[in-house]
Image (tube, rainbow, N blue to C red):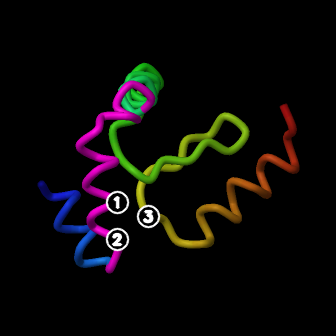
Amino acid sequence: ENLKVFAEELGLDTTAFNECLDSGKYAEVVAADASLARSLGISVTPTFWINGQMLVGALPFDAFAGAINNAIASPR
């Protein structure tokens, strides 16, 4: 129900959104993605991987710049 409220708050076409959500059309794909995330130790969104370094949460630009610069300096 929260997703439906969010969709309405965002001004989405709630009829189309609700039909898609209620159909379960993408439930298997979402479950597979969630399972993969858990197997990788991901429990928070957003989570990013840059050259093997995991960045968790809404981080400032400098965190990404540092990870990218490290990746450039030490490619895998």
The residue at the point 29 percent across, 46 percent down is 21
Left or right: residue 62 versus residue 41 is right
The residue at the point 17 percent across, 67 percent down is 5
User: Can you say whether 53 is above or below 6 in the image?
Assistant: above
Give the image quarter of residue 66.
bottom right
Q: State the SS at label 3.
A: loop
User: Can you say whether 23 is above or below 63 in the image?
Assistant: above
Instruction: Quadrant for the N terminus, please.
Output: bottom left
| Tag 3 and tag 1, C-beta contact below 8 Å | no
Task: Determine crowd level at label 2: few under 14, some 14-19, many 20+ residues with C-alpha closer than 10 A.
Answer: few
Amino acid type at image mark 3: Ala
Q: Which tag, 3 or 1, sits closer to the chain's start?
A: 1
The residue at the point 25 percent across, 55 percent down is 18
Magenta stretch contains residue 3:
no
Give the image quarter of residue 10.
bottom left
The picture places residue 52, in percent across and down from the top left corner, at 66, 34
Magenta-highlighted residues: 11-29
Magenta stretch contains residue 20:
yes
The picture places residue 17, in percent across and down from the top left corner, at 32, 58
The picture places residue 57, in percent across and down from the top left corner, at 41, 56
| Tag 1 and tag 2, C-beta contact below 8 Å | yes
For disc 3, the marked residue is 58
Q: Main secondary structure of the magenta part?
A: helix
Task: Determine crowd level at label 1: few under 14, some 14-19, many 20+ residues with C-alpha closer than 10 A.
Answer: few
CA distance separating discs 2 and 3: 28 Å
CA distance separating discs 1 and 2: 6 Å
For disc 1, the marked residue is 16
The picture places residue 64, in percent across and down from the top left corner, at 64, 61
